[in-house]
Amino acid sequence: MPTTAKSIKKPVDVAPASRSMSRERRAPASGRRQGARPTGAGGEAPALRGKAKPKPDYTSPERLQKVFSALDQLFPQAQCALRHENAFQLLVATILSAQCTDERVNKVTPGLFQKYPTPQDFAALSQPALEEEIRSTGFFRNKARNIIGMAKKLVTDFGGQVPRTMEEMLTLPGVARKTANVVLGSAYGLATGVVVDTHVFRIARRLKLSNQETPEKVEQDLLKLVPLERWILFGHQVIWFGRKVCQARKPLCADCPLESICDSREKTV
Ligand code: SF4
């Protein structure tokens, strides 16, 4: 449901919606803004010659606090939008959410988990059978292969339980840091990192909290800036901020509470 100017000025109802893993254009990490006057000896404006403009400190504690406060105002109760009743269900749902909306995943998983409630059930599934069940989430061959492989490893190596450490999670097929952070944070309440999905990646760069080119490196920058006690909440808040306000194609900058501190060249005001 599109958000209006009115609705993003107050806490937003974070109902399951929207695309969580959509592809997007990545902005260049650096470089002058489009249309800006060239700098340097040849193109420097006479009035500025000899007076370098001070570079804003995008990661100052004051600025970070403004970001946290705005997110707390907008999304005080931000949570994972994927429906689940336990860590295993969340793990399956997160794998299914790659390149798919959470809404679509939430339509598929209730029936799937009713038919196959345990890792043992998934481990015993044939690839074609699971492909058929999850076809509508896209990339179903890869996802089916990963989910069956993951379930088999849970059964053989972890007693049928989803492990509780990042190191162990990363041994599971189809699981990288983002998925591991989602599951460890939302199912177990373990702050092992910050979830960096497509929204968090885009917004961290727009707000110039990171200029890195990969989600893994952006996460490492965020871990230095976001207090540990905020790691889990921050990821969910920024995901909702990306869905409702700082959208990929048309960010709602005129209504954004961070507009005054945002220097993104993708701003629409
Ligand atoms: S001002 Fe626009 S680009 Fe900047 S954070 Fe807000 S919505 Fe995003």
Image (cartoon, rainbow, N blue to C red):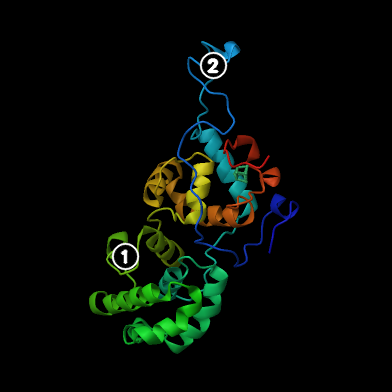
User: Residue 234 or 44: which is nearer the viewer?
Assistant: 44
The residue lying furthest to the front in this view is: 42
Q: Nearer the viewer, mark 2 or mark 1?
A: 2
Which quarter of the picture shows residue 148?
A: bottom left
| Residue drawn at the location 66% of the way across and 57% of the way down | 12
Quote the CA–CA distance across marks 2 and 1. 52 Å
| Residue drawn at the location 60% of the way across and 11% of the way down | 47
The disc, 2 or 1, on the residue closer to the chain's N-terminal end is 2
Q: Secondary structure at mark 1?
A: helix
Check the picture and name the quadrant holding the N terminus. bottom right
Which quarter of the picture shows residue 240?
A: bottom right
What is the number of callouts on the image?
2
Ligand 1 in which quarter: top right
Q: Secondary structure at mark 2?
A: loop
Q: Which residue is mark 1?
A: 169
The answer to whether residue 240 is above or below residue 260 is below
User: Residue 28 or 79: which is nearer the viewer?
Assistant: 28
The residue lying furthest to the right in this view is: 6
Q: Which residue is mark 2?
A: 44
Check the picture and name the quadrant holding the C terminus. top right
The answer to whether residue 103 is above or below residue 264 is below
Q: x%, y% of residue 86?
A: 44, 75
